[in-house]
């Protein structure tokens, strides 16, 4: 499992701290040992989740950018 932390010493007081994502060495090794198909399936699931939860304004900007890249 991953750990997400909202604490960071990099920010000035009063700013919103970034979310930091941590993995243990064991978790990294476990991921490395996964079959490539499982890694790709996991990546696809994350991409679908991020797209589904993306704010509408961000989605419009992303879709316009993607359209411009393919023309």
Image (cartoon, rainbow, N blue to C red):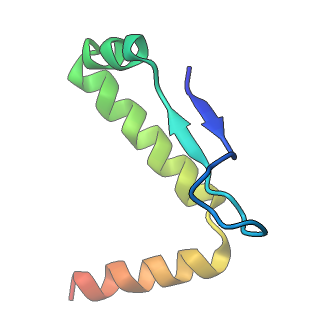
Where is residue 64 shown, x and y percent of the image?
42, 86
Give the answer, above or below, for where 13 lies relative to 23.
below
Residue 15 placement, left or right of 11: right
The quadrant of the picture occupied by the C terminus is bottom left
Where is residue 63 shown, x and y percent of the image?
44, 78
Where is residue 55 shown, x and y percent of the image?
66, 70
Occupied quadrant, residue 13: bottom right
Give the answer, above or below, for where 10 lies relative to 5.
below
* Camera-side residue of 39 and 18: 18
Q: Residue at x 33, y 83 (%)?
A: 67
Q: Residue at x 54, y 59 (%)?
A: 51
Where is residue 57 shown, x and y percent of the image?
63, 82
Occupied quadrant, residue 31: top left
Q: Residue at x 62, y 49 (%)?
A: 8
* Camera-side residue of 41 and 14: 14
Give the answer, above or below, for where 44 lies relative to 60.
above
The quadrant of the picture occupied by the N terminus is top right
């Amino acid at each position: 499992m991953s750990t997400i932390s909202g604490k960071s010493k990099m920010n000035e007081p009063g700013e919103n701290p970034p979310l930091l994502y941590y993995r243990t060495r064991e978790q990294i090794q476990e991921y490395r040992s996964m079959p490539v198909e499982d890694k790709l399936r996991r990546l696809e699931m994350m991409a679908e989740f991020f797209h589904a939860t993306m704010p509408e304004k961000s989605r419009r900007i992303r879709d316009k950018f993607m359209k411009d890249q393919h023309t």
